[in-house]
Image (cartoon, rainbow, N blue to C red):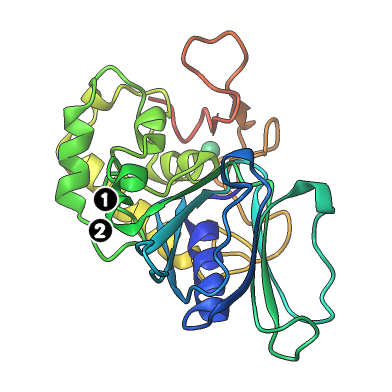
Amino acid sequence: MPEGDTVYRAARELDEALTGRVLTLSDFRVPAYATVDLAGRTVLGTIPRGKHLLTRFSAAGDSPPLTLHTHLKMEGIWQVQRPGDKWRRPTHLLRVRLAVGERDAADRIDALGFELGVVDLAPTAEEDTFVGHLGPDLLGPDWDVDEALRRMRGTDQDRAIAEVLLDQRVLAGVGNVFKSEICFVSGVHPHTPVGQLDDAKLRKMLVLSQRMLEANKLRGERTTTGIARRGQRLWVYGRRDQPCRRCGAKIRRAEDGEPGKERSTYWCPGCQAT
Ligand SMILES: [Zn+2]
């Protein structure tokens, strides 16, 4: 599932492949931008902002510099395709294609955005409309524990900590996998109201969150246990009814019908009692 670490890697890959080069083709397979043609513009860079991607292009004629905003949501990927590489998804799932270099040239690169959950294009001067609402970015140059803590306190204190960690307006980058893993490593039950956790505890959880995403931002396979071996990478996420790696208790997953408790939430009833 794409979270801050996945998006960071995608941004880096796009950035390294496209930045400084002139687009020879653009193809938007979303109705709102079906007629847009970015060919001739130079790619200025791609940056991650939480779980969002911003790709910037130079001005062209009377048109100002533009920013492409994409979000991977559940299924989306960006593939950087070089000559000879197979497409990783079928054609009908393509939403955006950006190419640099001439067709069949050795330096041709196609950036293929499949199943993107969000595709927006706007003048770069207005890109805050896409990401201005986000809290401090766990993997960004603006990461700020104090500001994230302030935003945690600014939200409804009856909200479950798991829900607050996911709230991108509080801090940007955590998705369902990290949410469960952060709560486990912190020894906090995911349904604990945030108001019941003191500042020192929340600060520790924020520091841990940043460390977990940082440790995974350049890895191919996400691990929170520090073990890279398949089947041993995560503490609780996706491990319903399996024994806890620390205490042996059966890992639980929130059930349908429990108010405010999403099925994507996992915890150990032994290690996260309260
Ligand atoms: Zn346990």
Q: Is residue 229 above or below residue 182?
A: below
Give the structural element (helix, strand or loop) at label 2: loop
Label 2, residues with CA under 10 Å away: few <14, some 14-19, many ≥20: some
Along the horizontal axis of the image, is 171 left or right of 60?
left
Q: Is residue 106 above or below residue 267?
A: below
Identify the residue under disc 2.
Answer: 143
The percent position of residue 125, horizontal first and vertical second, equals 27, 56
What's under tag 1, amino acid-wise? Answer: Pro
Q: Going from the N terminus, do you reach mark 1 or mark 2 first?
A: 1
Q: State the CA–CA distance, disc 1 to disc 2.
A: 5 Å
What's under tag 2, amino acid-wise? Answer: Trp
Assign the C terminus to one quadrant of the image. top left
Give the structural element (helix, strand or loop) at label 1: loop
Q: Which residue is drawn at the image coordinates 63% and 68% (left, top)?
A: 220
Find residue 232 and report its image quarter: bottom right
Dot 1 and dot 2 residues touching (CB under 8 Å): yes
Q: Which residue is drawn at the image coordinates 52% and 51% (left, top)?
A: 70
Q: Is mark 1 within 8 Å of ligand 1?
A: no
Q: Which residue is drawn at the image coordinates 50% and 74% (left, top)?
A: 15
Q: Is residue 56 above or below residue 176?
A: below
Which of the numbered marks, if any, corresponds to residue 136?
Answer: 1
Q: Is residue 215 above or below residue 258?
A: below
Along the horizontal axis of the image, is 86 left or right of 157?
right
The percent position of residue 18, horizontal first and vertical second, equals 55, 77
Residue lying at the far bottom of the rendered structure: 106
Residue closer to the observer: 48 or 173: 48
Label 1, residues with CA under 10 Å away: few <14, some 14-19, many ≥20: many
